[in-house]
């Protein structure tokens, strides 16, 4: 199937991507539970009954809700699941993890898109900064070997407020830290979270390079990817790309593999 619109249903919101010419050309972020906003966006994009949709998500009830909305419109849709990655036959990306069915499909799709960006066999590190922060690793041969999961910046900020007596809840603005330390409590939290995000990415890119003995290409995406604006990896890597469309493009590639 060649989709016209791809949908990534995340923990906090959903993203729609508009496809054309073998790539994702535009993106909007929408609430999970606002069919009015969905209808308005569909009108803006000129969606019709002939529009083909590809959907993936990590919140089953929200995936079902959205598929019901599509069905009521008479729309043609496919759902991308983890089963597609049981072998590398369909997409060129396989995985060697325990309990494949429990891996977030967004991690697999983002890894797929990142790996397919390479013009030559290259190991890949894939960073996705959202409600959770995930970092995944792909061998140069095209095998996803797993990754790490930690709280995203919003969860870090919320936990500091919820599990301490005096620390305030701060609004997260994902951008590189302007200084190495904060001058007040709020700025200390801001700088701490920013450095937590950047430091774990740096360390794990370094570790993957050491483990493979090759220079990996590093990709970053997600709603809080702004932390990486202008960031320079000191680790010996092949290159670094910020790509806000990465997960959506993984859905597009996976849907086309189902044809």
Image (spheres, rainbow, N blue to C red):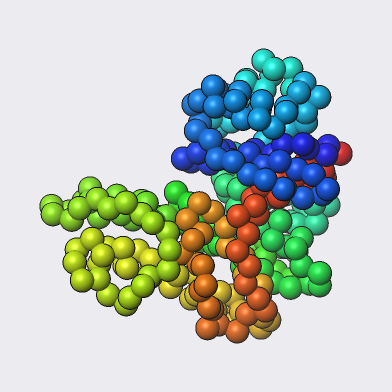
61 versus 220 height, above or below: above
Quarter holding the N terminus is top right
Quarter holding the C terminus is top right
* The one of 116 and 181 positioned closer to us in this rendering: 181
Residue drawn at 78 percent across, 28 percent down:
51
Asked whether, in this view, residue 162 is left or right of residue 67, the answer is left
Residue drawn at 54 percent across, 54 percent down:
222
Q: How many labels does the image show?
A: 0
38 versus 175 height, above or below: above
Q: Where is residue 176 in the image (x, y as percent from the top left)?
A: 42, 68
**Residue sticking out furthest to the top:** 72
Residue drawn at 55 percent across, 40 percent down:
29
* The one of 109 and 100 positioned closer to us in this rendering: 109
Whether residue 120 is visible here, answered yes or no, is yes
Residue drawn at 49 percent across, 61 percent down:
226
Q: Position of residue 36 (x, y in %)?
A: 54, 22
Image quarter of residue 95: bottom right
212 versus 150 height, above or below: below
**Residue sticking out furthest to the front:** 44
Asked whether, in this view, residue 97 is left or right of residue 170, the answer is right
Asked whether, in this view, residue 87 is left or right of residue 60, the answer is right
Image quarter of residue 199: bottom left
Q: Where is residue 258 in the image (x, y as percent from the top left)?
A: 82, 40
63 versus 172 height, above or below: above
Whether residue 96 is visible here, answered yes or no, is no
* The one of 71 and 174 positioned closer to us in this rendering: 174
């Amino acid at each position: 199937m060649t989709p016209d619109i791809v949908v990534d249903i995340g923990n906090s919101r959903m993203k729609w991507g508009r496809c054309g010419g073998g790539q994702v050309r535009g993106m909007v972020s929408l609430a999970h539970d606002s069919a009015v906003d969905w209808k308005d966006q569909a009108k803006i994009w000129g969606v019709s009954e002939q529009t083909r949709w590809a959907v993936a998500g990590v919140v089953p009830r929200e995936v079902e809700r959205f598929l019901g909305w599509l069905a009521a419109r008479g729309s043609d849709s496919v759902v991308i699941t983890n089963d597609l990655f049981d072998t590398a036959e369909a997409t060129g990306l396989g995985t060697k993890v325990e309990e494949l069915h429990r891996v977030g499909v967004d991690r697999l799709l983002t890894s797929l898109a990142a790996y397919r960006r390479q013009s030559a066999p290259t190991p890949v590190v894939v960073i996705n900064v959202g409600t959770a922060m995930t970092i995944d690793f792909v061998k140069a041969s095209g095998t996803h070997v797993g990754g790490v999961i930690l709280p995203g910046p919003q969860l870090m900020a919320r936990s500091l407020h919820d599990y301490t007596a005096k620390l305030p809840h701060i609004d997260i603005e994902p951008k590189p830290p302007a200084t190495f330390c904060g001058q007040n409590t709020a700025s200390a939290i801001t700088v701490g979270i920013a450095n937590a995000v950047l430091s774990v990415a740096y360390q794990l890119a370094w570790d993957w390079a050491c483990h493979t003995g090759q220079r990996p290409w590093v990709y970053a995406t997600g709603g809080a990817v702004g932390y990486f604006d202008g960031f320079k990896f000191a680790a010996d890597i092949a290159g670094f790309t910020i790509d806000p469309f990465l997960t959506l493009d993984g859905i597009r590639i996976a849907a086309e593999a189902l044809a």
